[in-house]
Amino acid sequence: MKITVDEWICHYLSDRERLELISKFLQKMEEKCDKIVVKRGSKLMSKIWNISKESQYWELERRLLAKHFFNSFIKNSNKCEILEEHEIPPMPTGLAQLVPKDDHYLVQTALATEDKFILTTDEKLYKIISSHSSIKIELVESFLSKYLAN
């Protein structure tokens, strides 16, 4: 499965209280051969690059997890698909009017994949997408409880 993620993944990586949860998620993704999908040049990619720099000052456990995420996912085309601008479809007109402009890249990235799946913590975006689109969207906490149980 190709999972289009937003900034929650960076927040979870930098949050000591979510360290175990994000670690289990990444491990499960490796086991299931699932992929993260991101758009090159997006605000998410900027945050990922910032974490790669900032994490050198974190305590050992978080630093190692951030390094693992960066090396085993972001730099690994089997675990992360980084889409180029020309691979991203235009935003559908109806959705463009409903989805906040800052989230257009996320919707467009999901539309470029076969699974058309977004994983987010943004409840407003969740409500918009789930009621007005064929894109599958789930909230992180709900998804992870099912995903990690399988």
Image: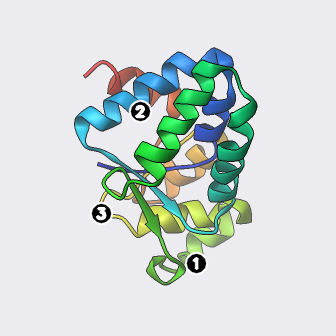
Q: Are marks 3 and 1 in contact (CB under 8 Å)?
A: no
User: Splitting the image into 4 quarters, where does residue 115 fall?
Assistant: bottom left
- Residue at disc 1, secondary structure: helix
Q: In the figure, is residue 49 to the left or right of 88? A: right
- Residue at disc 3, secondary structure: loop
Separation (CA) of disc 1 from disc 2: 34 Å
Q: In the figure, is residue 19 to the left or right of 149? A: right
| Position of 52 relative to 39 (above/below) | above
Q: Are marks 1 and 2 in contact (CB under 8 Å)?
A: no
Give me the disc on residue 104. Answer: none
Indicate the position of residue 44 as horizontal and vertical percent values: 64, 54
| Residue at the spot of label 1 | 93
**Which three-letter amino acid code belongs to the residue tagged 3?**
Glu
Q: Nearer the viewer, residue 2 or 52?
A: 52
Mark 3 neighbour class, 10 Å CA radius: few under 14, some 14 to 19, many 20 or more: few
Query: Closer to the observer: label 1 or label 2?
Result: 2
Q: Nearer the viewer, residue 144 or 56?
A: 56
| Residue at the spot of label 2 | 26
Query: Closer to the observer: label 2 or label 3?
Result: 2
Q: Earlier in the sequence, mark 3 or mark 1?
A: 1
